[in-house]
Amino acid sequence: MNRLTAPFYRIHWPLIIYRHLWRECWDIFAVGLLAITVIVFMGRITRVMQMIITKGVSLIDIGKFCVLLLPYLLLFTVPMAAMIAVLITFLRLSNDNEIMALKTSGVSVLQLLPPILAFALVISSTALFFSLYATPWGNQEMRRLLSEVTKRRADLGIREQVFNNDFEHVVLFVNRVPTSGGPMEGVFLSDDRDPQVPITIAADKALLLFDLKSERLIMQLFQGRVLRLSEDATSFHSIEFETYQVPLELFKFVPKPKSEDEMFLGELRQALAQHKPGTLDYNKLLVELNRRFSLPVGACIMILIAMPLGISTQIKGRAVGLIMGLVIFLLYYLLLTAAWRLGQHAIIPPGLAPWLPDFIFLFLAWGLWRRSRRDIPIGAGAFEVKRWIKRKFMKTVDGGQ
C-alpha cells in the first residue's frame, strides 16, 4: 500500500461500516416501532373504542382519539424499538462472525460506537420532544375532546336497565339507551333536589340535550306523567304531559385544574412555586418535572446497553433479541414506576427518584462494556461458577469415599 492510497483506506474504511450499521439500525427500528406501537396501541384503545363504538360516536372523533393517544405511546415505544433495533443488529453481526472479522481487521468495539451513539442521540432528542411538548399537548387535547363528546352525547354516561344514582339527589332508570343517539325509552326519574316537594316522572321517551348558553343539561321527556307529593305529605298530584323539560346537572363541566402530566415545562415550574415543599402535590410536580428529562436520558442509556449485550450474547435468533429487549425495557419501566411512587411519598428524594433507573442501568452499561472489551461472553461467569461448584462437589465425594 503506497502513501497515496493509505489515507484513502484510513478515511473510508470506517465510513463504510458506519453507514452499514446506521442503515441496518434504522431499518429494524422502523419495523419494530410499527409493530410495538400497534400492539401497545390496541391494548390502550380497547376500552375507549368499546365506549365509542357502542355509543355511536362519529368516526372523526374516533380518529382524533387515536391521534391524541399516539404521543404518549410513542414516548415509550420509540426508545423500546430503538433498543431492540441495536440489540438485533449486533446479535446478527456477532452470530454471523462479522464482529470477529472486524476485530481481526483491527477494528475494536469502541470504533463501532460512533454511529450507534449518533443513533442514540437522535432517539433521545425525539423522546425529549415527546416528553416536553407532544405528550402534554396530547393529554390536554384528549381531555378537551372527551368533554366535547360528552356534551354532544350526554347520554354516554347513562347505563340502561340500571338505577343510576351517581347524580346528586337524582335517581334515573332507563330501559333502553340506543347506540345511535336517538331518544331513550322507558324513563323513570326521581328528583329529590327540593326535599319539600319531591317529584317522580315516568315517560315513554326522553332526550338529553346540552344547552350551550346555560352550560347545563336538559332532559326533554315525551308522553309521560309527573307525580308530585303535596307539601303536607297527605296527597299526590298527577299531571300527564306530551313534552316536559327537566334541567339536570348529571355532569359538571366545571374546568378542572391541569394534572401534572398535562402541564408544559413552564407550567410545571410555576405550579412548583405555588406549592409548599414537602407536600404531596409538590412532590408529584417535582417527580414529573425530572421524569420529563430522565426518560430521554434513559433511552440513550438503554441503546448503549443493547450494543455490548448484542456483541457478547452467544445466542442466535432475532426472536431472542426481541425478547431480551422487551425484558430489559420492562425492568426499566418497573423501576421507574416504583421510583415514581416512592418519590411522590418522599420515601426517596422526589428530585432523585426518576433518575434512579438511569443510574442503575448506567452501571449495568458500564459492566457490559467492560466485559465486551475483554471478550467475555454473557453467561461466562455463570459457567465458571457452575464448573467451580461441580469441582468442589467431586472433591467432596472423592474425599468421602
Image: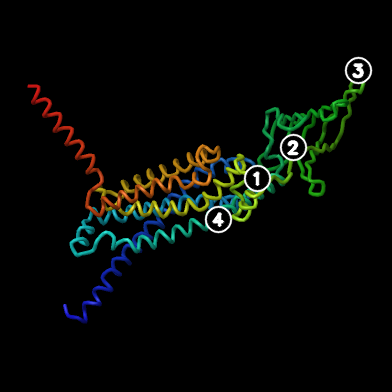
- The N terminus: image quadrant: bottom left
Nearer to us in this view, 155 or 320: 320
Residue shown at the point (8%, 25%) measured from the top left: 399
Q: Earlier in the sequence, mark 4 or mark 3?
A: 4
Mark nearest the camera among 2 and 3 is 2
Q: Are marks 1 and 3 in contact (CB under 8 Å)?
A: no
Q: Secondary structure at mark 4?
A: helix
Q: Position of residue 365 (x, y in %)?
A: 34, 50
Q: Position of residue 53 (x, y in %)?
A: 60, 43
Q: Are marks 4 and 3 in contact (CB under 8 Å)?
A: no
Q: Secondary structure at mark 2?
A: loop
Type of amino acid at the residue the image marks with label 3: Thr
Nearer to us in this view, 264 or 400: 400
Relative side of 76 to 215, left or right: left
Which picture quadrant has residue 19? bottom left
Q: Are marks 2 and 1 in contact (CB under 8 Å)?
A: no
Mark nearest the camera among 4 and 1 is 1
Q: Secondary structure at mark 1?
A: loop
Type of amino acid at the residue the image marks with label 1: His
Above or below for 263 versus 245: below
Q: Earlier in the sequence, mark 4 or mark 2?
A: 4
Type of amino acid at the residue the image marks with label 2: Leu
Instruction: Tell me the number on the disc at residue 132.
Output: 4
Q: Position of residue 168 (x, y in %)?
A: 76, 32
